Image (cartoon, grey):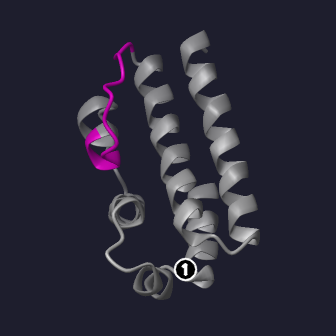
Amino acid sequence: MKKASENWLKIAERDLRAAKSLLKAGDSLNTIFHLHAAVEKILKGIAEEKGNNPPKIHALKKLAVDVCQLKLETHVEILIKSLDKAFIDSRYPEDIEIFEEEYDNEYCIQLVKDVEV
């Protein structure tokens, strides 16, 4: 494995650990941010392995399909779309109470489980 790819994966592991810690603390907003970051960095590691310089973008589907040239299974595509939407919502919440109702602890627990698979 290339050194650059290893670096992306090491950082992804840190983001996943951070997400789990934040989930335990009841911080759904930052749990989602770090879950999205973990998946993004895994994809950028895959891009490095394939010889593609990962672009400085956050769109998971674009990274997976256009940059990494992955064929996504339906459940993975659904997860990526959910993470992309939740990421945008977490960065620009119109109302934090509404955000925390939509992305409650149970929702975040399931996201963590889905990302770990």
Residue 113: % across, % down: 64, 67
Identify the residue shown where x is 55% and y is 55%. Answer: 35
Residue drawn 56% across the image and 52% down it: 34
Per the image, is 53 magenta? yes
2 left or right, relative to 68: right
Q: Main secondary structure of the magenta part?
A: loop
Of the pair 62 and 95, the residue shown nearer to us:
95
Residue assigned mark 1: 107
Instruction: Give the position of the N terminus as an image quadrant.
Output: top right
Q: Disc 1 on helix, strand or loop?
A: helix
Q: Is residue 117 visible?
A: no
Coordinates of residue 68 in the picture (x, y in percent): 34, 31
* Residue 56 visible in the snapshot: yes
Q: Answer with left or right where residue 76 lies relative to residue 100.
A: left
Query: Would you identify the image quadrant in which residue 99 lies?
Result: bottom left
Magenta segment boundaries in residue numbering: 51-62
Provide residue 61's location: percent of width, then percent of height: 30, 48
Kind of residue at badge 1? Tyr
Question: Which corner quadrant of the image does residue 65 belong to?
Answer: top left
Callout 1: 10 Å neighbours few (<14), some, many (20+)? Answer: some
Q: Is residue 9 left or right of residue 96?
A: right
Image position, residue 97 (x, y; %): 46, 86
Compared to residue 93, the image places residue 60 above or below, namely above
Q: Is residue 11 left or right of residue 61?
A: right
Residue plotted at (48% across, 52% down): 36
Instruction: Count the marks.
Output: 1
For the point 40% across and 18% down, the residue is: 50
**Which image quarter holds the C terminus?**
bottom right
